[in-house]
Amino acid sequence: MFDEHLTIQTERLVLRAFGPGDAERVRAIVKEGTHSTALPPGAPGYLAGIAQWLSHGVHELRKSGQGMHLAIEAGGAIVGAISLFKTHWGAGTTEVGYGVHPSYRGRGFAPEAVRGLTDWALGPARLRRVELRATVENIASLRVAEKAGFTREGVLRGAGFEDDGPHDVVVFGRLRGDAGPGFDGFLQSERLLLRPFQKRDAFDVLAAVKDDAEMLRWMPWVPGYTLERALDWCTRVAHPGSLSGLTFALEPRDGGRLAGALGVHRVDRERGDAEIGYWISPWARRQGYAVEATRRVAGWLIAQGYIRVQLMIAVGNTASRAVARKAGFVEEGMIRQGLPIPHGRADAVLYSILREGL
């Protein structure tokens, strides 16, 4: 069932339940006549009905167990609303709908909110499918669905009805375990942009590994590394076209050189687990970037429906092991000769994090 205290934090937004404390903000929306787009279906179009709606009406859907209405909040303002409805817990399916206040459109709030609520539904809520529908003429909503990682599945002829008559409706879906069709390879955390590698990164990659004692000690691919190999990595190898082998370049959001890389490896959809690994450029170490990126990608993988994310770290790599602990990973044991290193193999410590750890 749906938690009345559910709060979902995205990069810029808070998705949370409406309450009596929203009376003034809702009153302002109703006064300006934008309630049909900025508030959930069923919201009153007159001031006298606001108190009753905030106390009872907006919560009826949640109490029925079939869905919930959440406010989309940015910077203390209600910029829209988002809902789950037609939820079938036995089948594991639900539908998502949303609206954004006209004054706040064009800022990417809709796809961010849809992505955040869908990640929760397919992750912690353990639903298996979220559906989104939009009329074929609603180009903005079609783009929102694509940006939020939904797959276009087909058209229902005449399935929608508006003031001017019936409309064809496009059906989109996201399933638990999807890497997100339409996922463009970009994630963001508090201080980092996690993005695909680009040709311009090759010089920083070479500078990060060349003559660095830590990289030379632990990374088997580092000895003899050249600019040609860095260019091949940044333009081809780091772009596998699938979740397994996906690699993020870590770029500080406030500017600066490449901070490092984080990759996803050994993905097993049937078992629901994935392995990640990372390295940090010498000039970006001891700033918490590895912890931040590790938690962000682990959380993203679990939001896609994976049950377990793991790390394998050489026993003697104390700095990397400290990162795993700070990121919330739990040490499980040692794997003898589990990792290749430049001059042989090293015993490895296995760490993992589950949904509860995030």
Image (cartoon, rainbow, N blue to C red):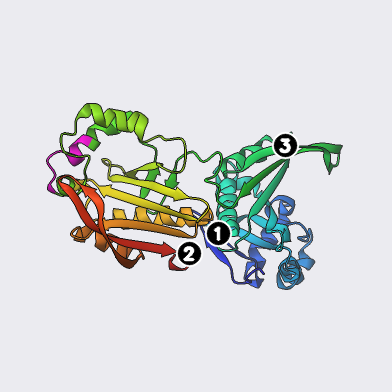
Secondary structure of residue under mark 3: strand
Secondary structure of residue under mark 1: loop
Whether residue 296 is in magenta: the answer is no
Magenta residue span: 206-213
Q: Is residue 185 visible?
A: yes
Q: Is the C-beta separation of discs 1 and 2 under 8 Å?
A: yes
Sequence-wise, which precedes: disc 1 or disc 2?
Answer: 1
Residue type for callout 1: Gly
Q: Residue at x 51, y 51 (%)?
A: 269
- The residues bearing labels 3 and 2 have C-alpha atoms spaced at a distance of 33 Å
Q: Residue at x 14, y 46 (%)?
A: 343
Q: Which residue is mark 2?
A: 355
Secondary structure mostly seen in magenta is helix
Tell me the quarter of the image containing the N terminus: bottom right
Q: Which residue is mark 1?
A: 123
Q: Quadrant of residue 322?
A: bottom left
Secondary structure of residue under mark 2: helix
Q: Which numbered marker is on residue 154?
A: 3
The reply, left or right, for residue 167 in relation to residue 146 is right
The reply, left or right, for residue 194 in relation to residue 29 is left
Whether residue 210 is in magenta: the answer is yes
Picture layout, residue 244 above or below residue 81: above
Residue type for callout 3: Gly
